[in-house]
DNA sequence: GTCATTTTGTTCTCGCGTTCACAAACTCCT
DNA sequence: AGGAGTTTGTGAACGCGAGAACAAAATGAC
């Protein structure tokens, strides 16, 4: 189980590094748009808002793509990171739950620009099935199976109310989706082999509130 | 600098624990709604999707609110966590950028239910100033100073395009906001004493894509 | 060709977070 | 009252990630 016998690209990239690669990718895109051809780890680290030592260590997990004494070729490094993450290929995505948030997600331009393609918008409410959002028509949730099978969808986005989220997730897993991005404020239980990431506005605000409260307390005792 | 002389509640709660407290709080709310009065660490951990040992250790940073051999009183623990996070008080919040996402955020019910009150919606585009969203009218961005001063706002939400985000953040910090929740896909530079948390859809999807790609590769070599 | 300069890639150390394992403490039954 | 059964709170071990520091490698000046 631990022995990886794959003959290529079997290097384990730490999770913390994986989470930063998209940030580096975005920073490189910005540099490239500004016509910058080469950059040092210091430059890129500043653009990405991290320590340069950490950046170099992160990149070293991918391979040796820099030149000592010179730095990194922006476009070359950009391609290498994109390939490593997997955004050089096309990822079909379904969004379930076309309320306020679902609308915003469907219209989000950052989707298309990164290899993610919204192939379907699904909602349980028949009243929404007439709508066309961002050029894609809203369809009944029951169409999920067919769409996933036909389009080879691996990634699903849940933007439903909390009460519906677990049932949606169960169905997604059942029909073969193995990565879920969950915007509903609830914990999802899925089997092994399925990745879930959650985005939770309320939790982020509460974390900020905690620190804000501590700042106020520190102020008071000072 | 290291010596904390505050005479009360000076215990340092680890950041990782702080990030989980809102999850526990939500789980406790659900249990309470279901009429459950007492729960064990095992129960609560299951509801929150974490290990029970981790849960107990997290709670131990707050104090000793359980009873050995019995478990935790749901409502009592709920109150203690809420107080620790700071959501027993009222937090006025401003949202800047009322596009698709700003609309969704303004309408998000999880705001009010947790002590967060949207006191203003701001947008630089004059065309939006006629709108009323979620019962709050959209006002010019320049009103920020006045609103923050009058309402004592400490938390700001940025839902603008990436290009505008840094300028908005600068202004927020200038007028006294010390906690920022950033939805714009860009790195924000702020001075010390200001907390920034970011929510980035595109990054989350790319992380999922990476793992998805690895699953596919593992499949191929198997 | 040699030396000084720059910048990467890597090693090492430290601290934080997770998990295990168990003693302390409470309840309930007899 | 005492003992069996539960469940919390915490001490200790372990593993991962962050950052400092340095060696290796490339460029450019002379």
Image: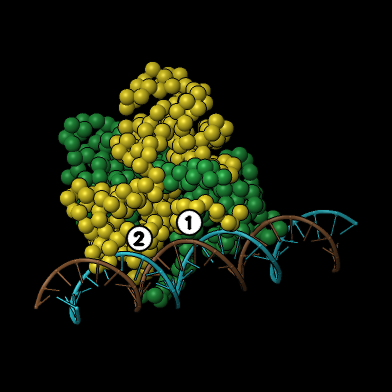
Chain colours: A green, B yellow, C brown, D cyan
Q: Which residue is rendered at x = 52% and y = 26% of the image? A: B145
Dot 2 falls on which chain? B
Q: How many marks?
A: 2
Q: Is residue B46 left or right of residue A80?
A: left
Residue situated in front as seen by the camera: B207 or B200: B200
Q: Secondary structure at mark 2?
A: loop
Tell me if residue B86 comes above or below residue A85 in the rendering: above
The residue indicated by pointer 1 is B12
Q: Which residue is rendered at x = 17% and y = 45% of the image? A: A142
Q: Quadrant of residue A97?
A: top left
**Quadrant of the frame with the N terminus of chain B:** bottom right
Tell me if residue B93 comes above or below residue A38 in the rendering: above
* Sequence-earlier tag: 1 or 2: 1
Residue situated in front as seen by the camera: A24 or B40: B40
The residue indicated by pointer 2 is B64
Is disc 2 on the same chain as disc 1?
yes
Dot 1 falls on which chain? B
Q: Secondary structure at mark 1?
A: loop
Q: Residues within 10 Å of mark 1 (few under 14, many from 20)?
A: few
Residue A46 visible in rendering: yes
Residue situated in front as seen by the camera: B38 or A9: B38
**Quadrant of the frame with the C terminus of chain B:** bottom left
Disc 1 to disc 2, C-alpha distance: 15 Å
Q: Where does residue B38 sit, x and y in percent of width and height?
A: 21, 57
Q: Where does residue B143 sit, x and y in percent of width and height?
A: 49, 22
**Tag of residue B28:** none
Q: Which residue is rendered at x = 35% and y = 60% of the image? A: B64
Q: Is residue B76 left or right of residue B142?
A: left
Q: Where does residue A66 sit, x and y in percent of width and height?
A: 62, 58
Q: Where does residue A28 sit, x and y in percent of width and height?
A: 56, 47
Q: Quadrant of residue B201?
A: top left
């Amino acid at each position: 189980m631990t022995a990886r016998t794959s003959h290529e690209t079997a290097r384990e990239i730490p999770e913390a590094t994986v989470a930063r690669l998209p940030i580096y990718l975005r920073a490189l895109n910005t540099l490239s748009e500004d016509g910058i051809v080469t950059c040092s780890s210091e430059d890129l680290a500043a653009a990405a808002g991290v320590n340069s030592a950490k950046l170099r260590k992160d990149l070293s997990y991918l391979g040796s793509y820099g030149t000592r004494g010179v730095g990194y070729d922006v476009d070359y490094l950009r391609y290498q990171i994109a390939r490593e993450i997997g955004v050089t290929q096309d990822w079909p995505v379904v969004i379930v739950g076309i309320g306020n948030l679902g609308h915003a997600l469907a219209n989000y331009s950052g989707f298309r620009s990164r290899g993610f393609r919204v192939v379907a918008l699904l909602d349980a409410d028949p009243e929404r099935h007439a709508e066309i959002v961002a050029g894609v028509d809203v369809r009944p949730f029951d169409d999920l199976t067919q769409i996933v099978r036909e389009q080879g969808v691996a990634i699903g986005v849940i933007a439903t109310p909390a009460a519906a989220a677990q049932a949606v997730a169960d169905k997604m897993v059942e029909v073969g989706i193995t990565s879920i991005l969950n915007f509903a404020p609830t914990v999802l239980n899925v089997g092994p082999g399925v990745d879930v990431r959650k985005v939770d506005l309320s939790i982020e605000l509460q974390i900020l509130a905690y620190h804000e409260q501590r700042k106020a307390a520190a102020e008071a005792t000072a």
